[in-house]
Amino acid sequence: MIHAEQRSSITQFELGQMFRKAPPEQRDYQQAAAWFAHSARQGFRDAQYMTGLMHARGLGVERDPVEAYAWLKIAAAQGSRKAMRCLQRLRPQMSHTQLELGRERSRRYYRAFVEPTGR
C-alpha cells in the first residue's frame, strides 16, 4: 500500500512531467521545475533527479551547477543511474569551490529530505 505522502510526491512529479512534456506551445518549464521541487523535497528520487537536471540545464530555473549537483547527488545516492551519469558530465564543468558547496548542500538536503522518510 502506498502511503498518502508518497502518492502526493508521485502526483507532484507527474504534474511536473506533464508541464515538461507538453506540446511546445503549452510547455511550461517554470511550472515543471516547481512541481519537481515539491516532490523532491518529499524524498522522491525521480523528482530529485529532475530538479537537478532542470538546474543543470537552466530549464524553468536559473542555471545553477551547485544546486544541480546537490539534487543529483542525493538522487544518485538512492540509486538513480541517470543522476550518476549526469553528475559525471557536470563535475568537470565545476570549480573546486562549486564542488565543495554542492557536496555540503547535498548532505544538508539528504538529511532534510531523505533520511526522515526512511527511504
Image (spheres, rainbow, N blue to C red):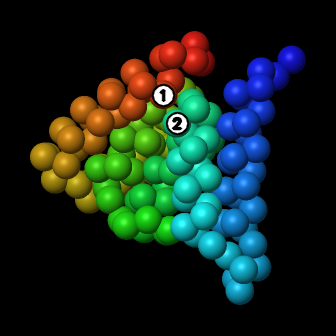
Asked if residue 103 lies left or right of residue 59, the reply is: left
Return the residue nearer the eye: 89 or 34.
34
Q: Residue furthest bottom?
A: 25
Residue 77 image label:
none
User: Element type at marker 1?
Assistant: helix
Is 8 positioned to the left or the right of 117 in the image? right
Q: Nearest the camera: 60 or 68?
A: 60
Q: Residue at x 75, y 62 (%)?
A: 18
Give the alpha-carbon distance from disc 2 to disc 1, as whole Å.
5 Å
Quarter in which the C terminus is drawn: top right
Please tell me in which quadrant of the rendered image residue 10 appears.
top right
Visible residue check, residue 82: no
Q: Relative to residue 69, is residue 33 depicted above or below?
A: below
User: Is residue 52 visible in this depiction of the protein?
Assistant: yes
Q: Which residue is under mark 1?
A: 113
Q: Residue at x 49, y 60 (%)?
A: 54
Secondary-structure class at tag 2: helix
Disc 2 and disc 1 in contact, CB within 8 angstroms: yes
> Horizontal and vertical percent for residue 33?
55, 58
Q: Residue at point 39% right, 31% down?
A: 109
Split into 4 quadrants, where in the image is the N terminus?
Answer: top right
> Does residue 75 lie above or below 114 as drawn?
below
Q: Residues within 10 Å of mark 1 (few under 14, many from 20)?
A: many
Residue 12, horizontal then vertical, whole percent: 69, 46
Q: Position of residue 101 (x, y in %)?
A: 21, 41
The numbered dot on residue 41 is 2
- Location of residue 15 with respect to 20 vertically, above or below: above
Q: Amino acid at mark 2?
A: Arg
Could you tell me which residue is drawn at 49 percent across and 68 percent down? 59
Coordinates of residue 8 in the picture (x, y in percent): 73, 36
Few, some or many C-alpha atoms within 10 Å of disc 2 (few <14, some 14-19, many ≥20)?
some
